[in-house]
Image (tube, coloured by chain):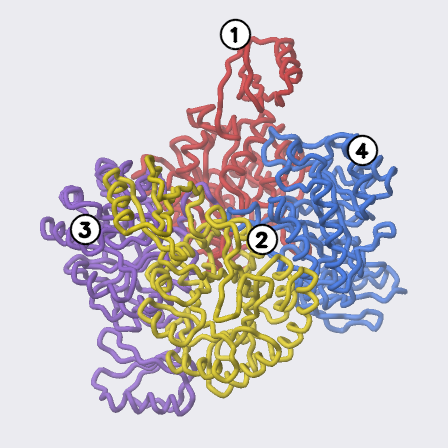
Chain colours: A yellow, B blue, C red, D purple
Amino acid sequence: MILKFKRDCTSEQIHEMESKLSADNIENYVVNYKGCRIIVCNGNVTDIPEYIESQIIKTPYKLASKEFQNEKTIVDVDGVKVGGNKIIMIAGPCAVENQESLIEEAHFLKSIGTDFLRGGAFKPRTSPYSFRGLKEEGLKILAEAKDETGLKIVTEVMTPTDVKLVAEYADVLQIGTRNMQNYQLLDEVGKSDKPVLLKRGMSATVKEWLLSAEYILSQGNPDVILCERGIRTFETALRNTLDLSVVPLLRELTHLPVIVDPSHATGKRSLINPMSKASIAAGADGLMVEVHPCPECALSDGEESLTFQQFGNLMEELKSVVKVFGKAI
Amino acid sequence: MILKFKRDCTSEQIHEMESKLSADNIENYVVNYKGCRIIVCNGNVTDIPEYIESQIIKTPYKLASKEFQNEKTIVDVDGVKVGGNKIIMIAGPCAVENQESLIEEAHFLKSIGTDFLRGGAFKPRTSPYSFRGLKEEGLKILAEAKDETGLKIVTEVMTPTDVKLVAEYADVLQIGTRNMQNYQLLDEVGKSDKPVLLKRGMSATVKEWLLSAEYILSQGNPDVILCERGIRTFETALRNTLDLSVVPLLRELTHLPVIVDPSHATGKRSLINPMSKASIAAGADGLMVEVHPCPECALSDGEESLTFQQFGNLMEELKSVVKVFGKAI
Amino acid sequence: MILKFKRDCTSEQIHEMESKLSADNIENYVVNYKGCRIIVCNGNVTDIPEYIESQIIKTPYKLASKEFQNEKTIVDVDGVKVGGNKIIMIAGPCAVENQESLIEEAHFLKSIGTDFLRGGAFKPRTSPYSFRGLKEEGLKILAEAKDETGLKIVTEVMTPTDVKLVAEYADVLQIGTRNMQNYQLLDEVGKSDKPVLLKRGMSATVKEWLLSAEYILSQGNPDVILCERGIRTFETALRNTLDLSVVPLLRELTHLPVIVDPSHATGKRSLINPMSKASIAAGADGLMVEVHPCPECALSDGEESLTFQQFGNLMEELKSVVKVFGKAI
Amino acid sequence: MILKFKRDCTSEQIHEMESKLSADNIENYVVNYKGCRIIVCNGNVTDIPEYIESQIIKTPYKLASKEFQNEKTIVDVDGVKVGGNKIIMIAGPCAVENQESLIEEAHFLKSIGTDFLRGGAFKPRTSPYSFRGLKEEGLKILAEAKDETGLKIVTEVMTPTDVKLVAEYADVLQIGTRNMQNYQLLDEVGKSDKPVLLKRGMSATVKEWLLSAEYILSQGNPDVILCERGIRTFETALRNTLDLSVVPLLRELTHLPVIVDPSHATGKRSLINPMSKASIAAGADGLMVEVHPCPECALSDGEESLTFQQFGNLMEELKSVVKVFGKAI
């Protein structure tokens, strides 16, 4: 059960309720959501004062559920709206590799109508002996690309102590697949005022994913964008198995926007174009695509990056595709 | 390595080659493919006579590979072409339940432009205590529906000794997911002159799937339609995980047409519409959808069946969707 | 609900009950189990005559459940008891390759105390271009090995029409992993009087596996031995993932004996010895191990076969291992 | 390729080599391992001075591989040796819940010969609305239990900034399954002087697991204990699928000790006893078992905890089991 306090409630009233719940041995968690105080209770409460509205939400995630909020969340990233009628496009290299190449790419991406520049400054790598990113230097290059082009920046943060630093440069904080259940990191981005792009864990169920979103929401940050990026299955023909059915499924379960990353999902350049279109058809709010000036010389994930020309073609082709689904791009 | 005999070769020449290979201890299999004699050899052959053309095919499936045949196979089902520019629609109930209801449904499906009527007369059921289908009686009802409407019939055959019987009534023989590696059944439908719709095994890799198609092709039946219907993964939110990326992947690996069954893949009525559109966007040649006059009273799979109205809407909406991908319906 | 008829019931009484159930629209299935007539009903029945004992069994499998029969089934294979205090050992090559080599192996296996000789005469192969076994010739070689050594024979049957033939030679009919849901085949071995070794499907849940056993039991054959042989998961370091926890789990769910095949489960020779011991420790009733006179020259599965010496060592080591678990070998 | 510097090398020699490698554009990482300086290079180096020994290691993990170190690592936890002849037993509640109950349990565990007390003070929870542990208060209770009984303490650390705090109280730092690829956390425990128990990620391959161990080793901490705790598969009958074959597989790949957690792997109390024995039979160096004074009133994971009596029985039964495998307990 959740208890929503009316907007003019005093903190005394909130504390009083907390004490009552604790006295009754009902576990409870006070959260802020879009300026409202809410108590999430594990158990049902009786004798609820009139300044509180109660709601029973059957799913374990509360704030993330459609039961709680029926209208879709539109995440406003400094004017670029994610979750509305416009399909948003996030593109860029897997990792920020050097200033010149990123700036060149940013100009290209801007010129064809991309909304966000992606690029890793902090890179999670399976092996300790792989390139782990340029770190703050990478963030600065991203900032420069933003200054020059106006593209918004999406970049990954891997550990709680880096959240402040990354938030200085990024417009959207990305949580990678390996960190979907890094709870201190979720808490920390939940306290940030920057929107969060939350990738699905590679073997996370939809329920677990929404509970990870709930970590962020329950810390007071309502701006979470979900990103499907493929799951791990027995099939080895492709890097991951893109679980595209979760896009319409999430529409029924949550009000949060959902985008798709066909690059990591398939790991295969030639499949990015058709699977981008399929993602739009399934109802995705946007796409996150790896693009590299020279995929074969990329420091990571080259085999799943599009060339400029391939991405240009995709953008062009998407224009008519999104229209048939009543969307713009 | 495969050896293709020129069309005017004598059977002596073929036998001679077989003897030579056996003498050299090279395992070999003689197959017919579209009127050509081909020997598939596990090993390389030298001194090849000029009436034989040899080809090295790197994949374990040979006839099914694009290396072997680059142009797409178009399966002609009595005038309805699968694999061409037109998206084909297969619809109907999970199981044939009774005459009246099926005939009514067939008329409806025909009226809105469906190409094929599906319906199980022989039903594979996890429990021995579930309805296993009307068997020959069900086939007769399908035949009647065909007579009345002209719809082509797709229906499942589960065991080699039933192939002849089912082929008398069906236009396309369906091999279900549990039988994808029932090799005697594959051999038997390979000897039939009816096209075969081969569903992917629920935990089959793409390679295994194409090798099962190869069983059929190598028995002389070139008309195989592949059908993705979801795979089994850790995710339990939906019945299966629709592996839609295999649609464009198969385009690169094989010349065979590929369709998608979003009903079994998702197991959830509300997802069939968006995932049908996503399948088209990914490049599928057709769709197989469960439709039932009264889903909640279906003997099996009701929760994944569309009502007539829902399927009518889907057909209507697909008209503009397929156009943007350069297809007709 | 199941209805058990007392032993002296007349067939009139059975027919009467069937008619009553059908009149009441209760789906029902009459089965024989160890000489008793039982009706399995999908629904609850009232007004049960005193010559019938009713039982509500909550699991979808009925005859296979411990609720139905608490004492363990001991399958008696012509004097060799599977499921009792003695661990049974099944060993032999993947496929029967030739007479001389199999007879030699049979003598060796007999000399060190093996109970059963295994060997495939009919081989399910992923590719149509692989050796599919010696068929009836292979069965005859197995029979000869039995004549010479007294070893019981376990061999696979792949299709319903071969059941009679294979049952002439085999002491135990093996259903392979790809055929666990080949229902006509299950029906057919259910009508045979030979015990059945039912391998788990490579992606079958425990519930599905027990329902496949139920197919056999419900046809009147009570002698089913379950065989865990590894499942398909994301892990590619080994051929399959041996799901050993199902051994004690099945003990709680079913009265049927359970053995383990560590050869197919791991696909790696060096792991067979430790995983055999682990299987015994987990409570398995027996082991099925591939042994080949010359693993590196085997026509199939050489890399997972033990040499004679390795299998001899294993048998020797198992003697003290089984003792600590209160078993004999 | 790795380059091992002789013990008397100067830091000038090391820097010189680094410069040479960087000049040659060979990525390189300097690590400390048991007092030796080693450079791991992505690429091969020629002209190696005589004070450096080079070795080519084919696996992506280097220090963790048996190629690098053939003799088994024995982790010495203040006198308790993990990886030697003695099977080590780690037991305790899922979470530290209160002082009284933990002290009582510690006395019991000590009395029957347990080596380590486990208990979570920091708890990773799928939902933000679940009990997350007593944090430092929990650590203090663990310390008190250690003071009273002499049991060594294993407890989880979830985030880099907590490593120092947890290391003050713990004898072994546990990295949980969700954090196996939390690389900053791995780096940080790699800099600690406390041994690390590294649980396998719930969908991690063996290769990824060993690369996570490599993160720790390459930071200079040689004391890593691997812990198999079940993987995520399609099977839902149990909480996870215990992948026991990795125990003998890891023996061939790495010198690090391996223990098994049958509680989390199965999630079912009645399976812990047989799967503990199976783990020993497979070659595990120890076991980690959840034990709770009152499993049904536990704040988390009650259904997978043993009672005192059940754990007492297991310890008693293991005495004869370990002996047959040449081990002590």
Protein chain holding label 2? A
The quadrant in which residue D290 appears is: top left
* Identity of the residue drawn at 32% across and 45% down: D263
Residue C217 spot, x, y in % from top left: 56, 28
**In this rendering, which labeled residue sits more in front, label 3 or label 1?**
1
User: Is label 3 or label 4 in front?
Assistant: 4
Side of B172 where C208 appears, left or right: left
The disc labelled 3 sits on which kind of residue? Asp
Q: How many numbered markers are drawn?
A: 4
Q: In which chain is the residue bearing label 4?
A: B
Same chain shared by disc 4 and disc 2: no
- Percent position of residue C102, x then y: 56, 47
Give the number of the mark in front: 1 or 2. 2
Amino acid type, label 4: Ile
- For the residues marked 3 and 1, what is the alpha-carbon distance in whole angstroms? 60 Å
Return the mark for residue A248.
Answer: 2
The chain that hosts pointer 1 is: C
Residue D10 visible from this viewpoint: yes
**SS at circle 4:** helix
Mark identifier at residue C138: none
Residue at 35% in and 74% down: A165
C-beta proximity under 8 Å, tags 3 and 1: no
Camera-nearest residue between B119 and A160: A160
Which residue was labeled with disc 1?
A: C50
Q: Residues within 10 Å of mark 1 (few under 14, many from 20)?
A: few
The label shown at residue D115 is 3
